[in-house]
Amino acid sequence: MKDRQNIHGSWANRWIFIMAATGSAVGLGNIWKFPYIAGENGGGAFVLVYLLFILGVGVPIMMAEVLVGRRGRQSPINSMREVAIESDHSPKWALVGWMGALAGFLIFSFYSVVAGWVLAYVAAMANGDFLDVGSEQAGKVFSDLLADPQTLLIWHSVFVVLVMVVLLGGVNKGLERATKLMMPALFVLLLVLLGYSMTSGSFGEGLDFLFHFDPSELSWDAVLVALGHSFFTLSLGMGSIMAYGSYMPKNASIGGTVLTIAALDTAIALIAGMAIFPIVFANSLDPGAGPGLMFITLPVAFGQMPGGQVFGFLFFVLVALAAWTSAISLMEPGVAWMVEKFGLKRGPVCILLGLVVWLLGIAALSSFNFGSDISLFGMNIFDFLDFITANVFLPLGGLFVACFAGWALKQKVTREELAMANPGYYLAWSVAIRYIAPVAVAAIFILNLIEKLG
């Protein structure tokens, strides 16, 4: 097959793709969710099960998304169509690309609201608003923020503009340049916070919470949590990785690259836990505070520790960077498709999509104040967008990608793109993508719906 050329450009090298895809995968959930669910569900035993699911489910599907993207060299929508046609299948497989692009667009609309909270806390930490405050006062600060639509609108708008400015620059001047700046900054901030945490006096207690090996705490529910997080943590099912894969150099190893991304994503989540929980324990606070850990518990901890204002500020800058790198990848599939479909420049496309997602974000943020009485299937707008994307679009997208790569694509195509010298590796991927991953993702889909709707 004649190698297709991507009109959007390509990554300068394999490591830029690794950093960009890791930035896509590392988001708000890595900073607080993974460390917490690991500590609550058996520590090291949970981490071990999670890593097995990463290898058996997350990595094979991620490899499938990358190979389809690189083979098609277009947006996920057009790549799915072209690669399906090449394998003598219906161009209607493009609907999977549509589902992913729409999921990313909808996720961005409410993700930008949460990222706006983070930006508000960057400013609050810089201003010293949490010095010597208690949990009740910190809780009031957060509830007051949610009840203030004007402030939420400002920070939501700032975040949308930050993302669109990067996207406007295209692959090389936008995505690649931002990746080169933001990902090293994220790693440095994470290590600085880890060093600060080691001086808290409770570093051993934090490590014990995160890594204690207790299989007795590893319930069936915990296994399902590990399975679900192994899928969602790698930004699968939303077209982001497929879009980034379309910019990947032809000679780069897909298998080795994806394993590196999965390893970095997991390492960042674990280091975040090692940085966060010693600070929580040093202040005798609740490590099981869920989302409140970030916006109530940690601000209290930073406000009571020596140098806490500075390191609290750095922490929320770190979280903002993680949100920024993830959000860029959410919008790229839609931007790429509109450029291809209508022959437009990226500038007008970014402005148009940015305006639409900004308006949808206003609807999402209204859920906490003036629009709190609006209900969709018993949920407010924010919760509905979260539910429909996380529980329907993403697992279905991942399931269809696995079935497409495992059953619809010609082996000639997958062998050429994966280019695995060891036939045993290809056999392992083939078994995982055909049988293990579809069953696991179908289980996520069905069990999540039962839990949410039951």
Image (cartoon, grey):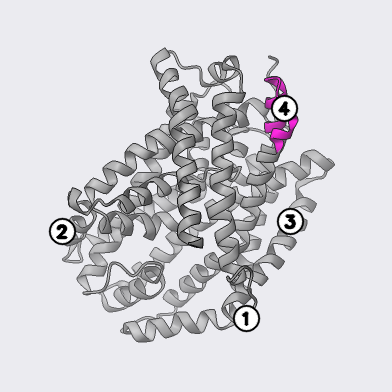
Q: CA distance from mark 2 to mark 3?
A: 47 Å
- Lower sequence index among marks 3 and 4: 4
SS at circle 3: helix
Residue 28 colored magenta?
no
* Residue visible at 29% across and 72% down in the picture: 307
**Residue 299: image x %, image y %?**
36, 74
Relative side of 258 to 46, left or right = right
Q: Which residue is mark 2?
A: 204
Determine whether label 3 and label 4 are within 8 Å by CB: no
Q: Which residue is mark 1?
A: 373
Of residues 388 and 238, the one drawn nearer to the viewer in this rendering: 388
Residue 93 colored magenta?
yes
- Lower sequence index among marks 4 and 2: 4
Task: Categorize mark 2 by other alpha carbons within 10 Å: few (<14), some (14-19), many (20+).
Answer: some
Q: CA distance from mark 2 to mark 1?
A: 46 Å
Of residues 297 and 381, the one drawn nearer to the viewer in this rendering: 381
- Lower sequence index among marks 4 and 1: 4
Of residues 128 and 152, the one drawn nearer to the viewer in this rendering: 152
Type of amino acid under label 2: Gly
Q: Which residue in the rendered view is the most extreme toward the front?
A: 454
* Residue visible at 39% across and 45% down in the picture: 227
Instruction: Identify the magenta region.
Output: 78-94
* Residue visible at 73% across and 33% down in the picture: 7
Task: Categorize mark 4 by other alpha carbons within 10 Å: few (<14), some (14-19), many (20+).
Answer: many
- Closer to us: mark 4 or mark 2? 4
SS at circle 4: helix
- Closer to us: mark 3 or mark 4? 4
- Closer to us: mark 2 or mark 1? 1
- Lower sequence index among marks 2 and 1: 2
Q: Which residue is mark 3?
A: 353
